[in-house]
Amino acid sequence: MIKIRLTPGLGVAQVLLGAALISQVGIFIKILVVDYAQPVLVVTFWRNLIVCLLLAAGLAVFKPQKLKAGRRNLPLLAFYGLVLTGMNGIWGGSVYFNGAGVATVLVYISVPITVLGQWMLGGEKPTLRILPSVLLCLIGCAMVCGITSLSDFSLTPAGIFLGLLSGLFYSAYSLFGRECAAREIDPFCVLMHVFGFSALFMLVINLCSAGVIPGTAPSPAAILMPGTDFRAWVLVAVLAAGPSMGGWSLINSSLSRLSPSVVNILLTTEPMMTALVAIPVLNEYMTAEQWAGCLLIVGGVIVLKKR
């Protein structure tokens, strides 16, 4: 395997900017689901497809030699696309059973999973120095999401299973990204294939579920979002071109400079950024506990930066 040269400063900047962008995804999704009554997994299908097409067009114009990832890498990218599909769908199921706050906290169980997974796959051995950063970020994330005591975790068996599984998929996303970086596949080529495969999997799920799975199309025709206001399509396009493509491009690029465990710790800043943007956009507000959680997350990132 090719040895990756780490350049931490640029990698940290990429992850934080990427987290700032993908933190807007939830806001766009909420508007499309609540204001325009669109099933969340239908929106996700179109988002993924548009990202794939935009990246394919961009590569064809500016880097045509990067369009092909190589035959030996296609199985890896297809499985990577399945991981992204799982991230989208399973997290949505976790939100359905647990609520958004608890689901967001559970997905960041991926941080310790990634640390251990990276070690087991022959990467950096975790040290005690990483523990304060992990704990500060996880506690801060819980507080930002409104989880301030164990009584807030009134979970069902299905909720626990989906919540932990979403964390596993989130961890797998980082580990697969690092493997693609190790194989020196262009990050934009990686994303084009990953979002393309994920769009295909999402299409199959929407076609086959007949609305049984929460958030899927109630009928095959509903996948085309008939009668939808033009402004909804504009929002889907902006969601794809901005937060999704821009955010994940930066994060995938950072995996050639940072270890997956560090990337996952830095991504715990995402709920804080979402909460901050939701104040002016959705007229939401943050409690004193949520502001305190923001400070803990910032503290965790500072501790990590000093490693």
Image (spheres, rainbow, N blue to C red):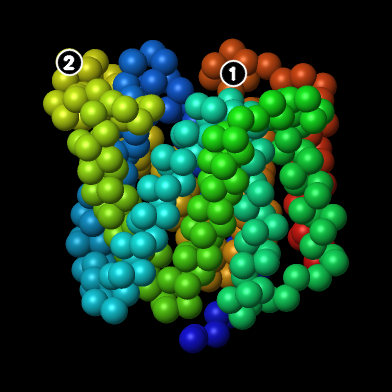
Q: Quadrant of residue 12?
A: bottom right
Name the residue: 21% across, 54% down.
57
Can residue 294 be seen at all in this image of the molecule? no
Seen at 35% across and 42% down, the residue is: 241
Q: Nearer the viewer, residue 9 or 199?
A: 199
Q: Which mark is residue 227?
A: 2
Residue 43: x and y, percent?
Answer: 32, 31
In front: label 2 or label 1: 2
The residue pinned by badge 1 equals: 280
- 249 vs 58, left or right, is right
Asked which secondary structure carries label 1, the reply is: helix
Q: Is label 2 in a helix, a strand or a loop? A: loop
Q: Counting other residues with Cα less than 10 Å from the Cα at mark 1, is it few (<14), some (14-19), or many (20 or more)?
A: few
Q: Quadrant of the C terminus?
A: bottom right
Amino acid on which the number 1 mark rests in the picture: Pro
Q: Inspect this view and state whether residue 197 appears.
A: yes
Could you tell me the amino acid type at mark 2?
A: Gly
Q: Position of residue 266 (x, y in %)?
A: 66, 52
